[in-house]
Amino acid sequence: MATTTTVLPARPRPVRHAPQVPVWRRGPKPKRRTELGLLVFAAAITVALYVIAELGTKGRVPAHLAPILAIILGMVLVAHLANRWLVPDANAVVLPLVALLNGIGYVIIVRFTPPAAKAQATWAAVGIIGYIAVLLAVRHTRDMDRYRYLLLAAGIALLISPLVPHLGRPITTTRLWVGLGPITFQPIEFAKLLLVVFFASYFAERKELLSIPTARVGNRLFLDPRPLVPILLFWALSMGIIALEDDIGFAMLVFTVFVVLLWVTTGRWAYIAFSMVLFAVGAFAASRLFSQVHVRIDLWLHAAPNTQLGYGFFDFAHGGIGGSGLGTDPLAGAFSWMHITTDMVFAAVGDQLGFIGAAAVVIAFVLLIGAGLRIAQAARSDFSRLVAAGLTAVLGFQAFFIMAGVTRLLPFTGITLPFVAYGGSSLVANYVLVALLMRVSEEGSSTIAERSKGISLPSDTEFLVAP
């Protein structure tokens, strides 16, 4: 008698979804230990500079030193704990360098414009909150690639918002500010980040079309220019909007980042040559059509002593090698004016800390840019690599343009020095930028399984000196 066997359907396995809140990863975190030591060192430098400034101004140690120390250490520890939780394997030097630059800027603001120091400290706290929020929201960089057109729409909306009646808050000739109740901010500071993400996504998708010659003319192959047309049209739209807002500094920054990402994507110098020609034509047209460009070039060539730039030159030269001294310079008030801690904060650093302090700021930026390029090198996808390279270019060229303007290497653009200058929009946006860099760094670091197999990534290798 034959027996039949009834085969029951397999019970479906429960689908395990990724936890909404990341779990705390146990185990040693050597990069975070290094970061903690560097953060404490940066906080110690900030507190020491603050004490020196108070001693020079008032002749005594400030009575509120303990609360100041607690606030500074508390802020850096909150950011450090967030890194331990959300990006335990990310780069260890980015956040300490940011804390150092932010601390130096805070001391300079306390020295020249004390009423603004409290607001700057508040915005730094908001920036750290934004830093943590971005790390929580952007769990994977591919999510940004997935929503690139939504991010593009948000970026365009932010660019246009200062031109909207009753929403924009024009200041002198520039139209960069938006007012929402008692809060005013510069939306272009956040729009530039969204533009970088969109540029990176577009170039990563069309890398081969932009790099490999496919258009045949006679017996020769040339690069097909058609994939570049949409992005050029959008770039022209962005430039037109920024021109209407009368801000040549950000126009130059966006153009430079666009060219950098195009070159990183393709590696073709022909694009650089074409961009230089495009820049020359645009600069010539801007100098004829926009009075602000003509005025800035004229000030660059013939800076009068009674202008903002002239005061900045006097301030910078007055510091000498070692600086006039934090709080001990009786002439500091004579060189002070309303823009000394915003547009011309690098001149204030040169006045108070001298060539040594200014060089320290430059070196900090060089190290920060180097860390950003190292993160881009270790990224695991074209999109992540371009995002890291673009964000690093934003930081690097923004710092270069303003420092070169203060030292008269380039025409003065008036954009802010990242993390050092006074300004809530810039500070919060730059903390968001650093959070995105740290996310890319976390994804590019080798996993525990890879390290157990002896696999190392570019971010895990040390610099080797050839014999």
Image: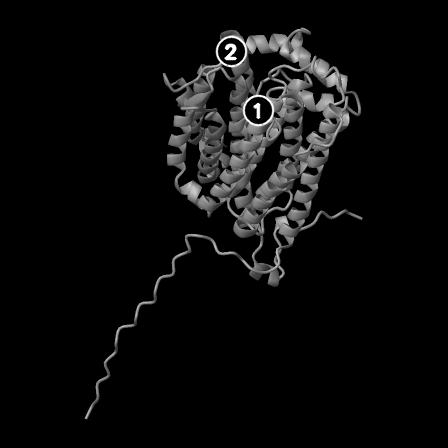
Upstream in the sequence, badge 2 or badge 1? 1
In the image, residue 438 above or below residue 323: below
Q: In the image, which disc is placed on residue 273?
A: 1
> The N terminus lies in which quarter of the figure?
bottom left
Q: Nearer the viewer, residue 141 or 128?
A: 128
Q: Which quadrant of the view contains residue 226? A: top left
Q: Residue 204: percent from the left, percent from the top?
A: 47, 39
Residue 427 quadrant: top right
Q: Amino acid at mark 1?
A: Ala
Q: Secondary structure at mark 2?
A: helix
**Nearest to viewer (mark 2 / mark 1):** 2
- Which of the two residues, 83 or 256, is positioned nearer the viewer here? 83
Residue 94 makes an appearance in the image:
no
Position of residue 397 measured from the top left corner of the image (x, y, whole percent): 60, 27
Residue at image point 65% right, 13% down: 309
Which residue does the numbered mark 2 point to in the structure image? Answer: 285
In this rendered view, identify the residue nearer to me: 40 or 259: 40
Task: Name the element at disc 1.
Answer: helix
